[in-house]
Amino acid sequence: MASKKSPTRVAVVTGAGSGVGRATVHQLAAQGWQVALLGRRADALKETIQLAPAASRKQLTAFPCDVGDAAAFDAAAAAILKKYGRVDVLVNGAGINIPKRALSVLSREDYRSVMAANIDGSLFAVQAFLPGMRANGTGTIVNICSDAGIKVSAKAGAGYAISKFGMRALTQAINEEERQNGIRGVCICPGDINTPILDKRPVPPPAESRPLMLQAEDVAAAVLFAVTLHPRALIEELVIRPTRAYLPVSAPQKP
């Protein structure tokens, strides 16, 4: 008697064009997952696919869109569900920050852009894929947060911290409402990661400090662990920081 074939595992990763999102795509693909890549820049998503091993590229499909644009996201989500029929894992990895981030210089326009990318898009994604997960009785939603969502820091700025506190609240809401339906919400709160977002700081950290920071693949490994854990077990929140100390660079911002 032939063995029963395991169903295809499907993951959606937002912010897949760089940093933690890109590293997560590559690690999931290496484990045999089909992955839908979301991000604003089609060229960056294409690069993520090209950087994957040749054997994994056929498992990756790009769906360019601005996750903070509700209509654009809904169209992308519909295309994903049409292609795959199900989503087992959602990784909300999209996130931005702005250079003028202190309260004294934070503009309303910049604040709205941070909230749209960091928290609105995450909520849109959760609401788009929850019904299917609920119907299947299983699913894992990973929100890439920050330790700035645990304790506010001047280097992260007010808008970014507010958005990341919101991601923790969203994760808790998922578990409060959906764990009885077999759905897990996981919040991963990294410290400083050596990704392009560091270059948006008013004073970017020096090159010599970056190897001591977390690397994107470190956080992606934590994502992979969380989503492959037995369905009976849930990591509600995971804080991951660099082992060794380094001296971050920051500077006050004048209005």
Image (cartoon, rainbow, N blue to C red):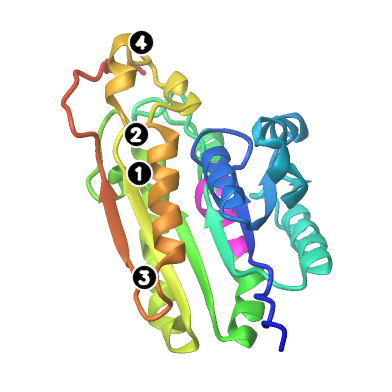
Q: From the image, tell me which residue sits under label 4.
A: 207
For the point 38% across and 15% down, the residue is 204
Q: CA distance from mark 2 to mark 1?
A: 6 Å
Disc 4 residue crowd, few under 14, some 14–19, many 20+, Cα 10 Å: few
Q: Nearer the viewer, mark 4 or mark 2?
A: 4
What residue type is disc 2 on? Answer: Gly
| Left or right: 148, with 68 as reference point | left
Does label 4 or label 1 sit earlier along the sequence? 1
Q: Position of residue 85 (x, y in %)?
A: 77, 73
Element on which disc 3 rests: helix
Q: From the image, tell me which residue sits under label 1.
A: 161
Q: CA distance from mark 4 to mark 3?
A: 36 Å
Disc 2 residue crowd, few under 14, some 14–19, many 20+, Cα 10 Å: many
- Kindly check if marks 4 and 1 are in contact, taking CB atoms under 8 A apart as contact: no
- Kindly check if marks 2 and 1 are in contact, taking CB atoms under 8 A apart as contact: yes
What residue type is disc 1 on? Answer: Ala
Does label 4 or label 3 sit earlier along the sequence? 3
Residue 86 seen anywhere in this rendered image of the structure: yes
Q: From the image, tell me which residue sits under label 2.
A: 157
Q: From the image, tell me which residue sits under label 3.
A: 172
What residue type is disc 3 on? Answer: Gln
Q: Which residues are magenta?
A: 116-125
| Quadrant placement of the N terminus | bottom right
Does label 1 or label 3 sit earlier along the sequence? 1
For the point 77% across and 35% down, the residue is 42
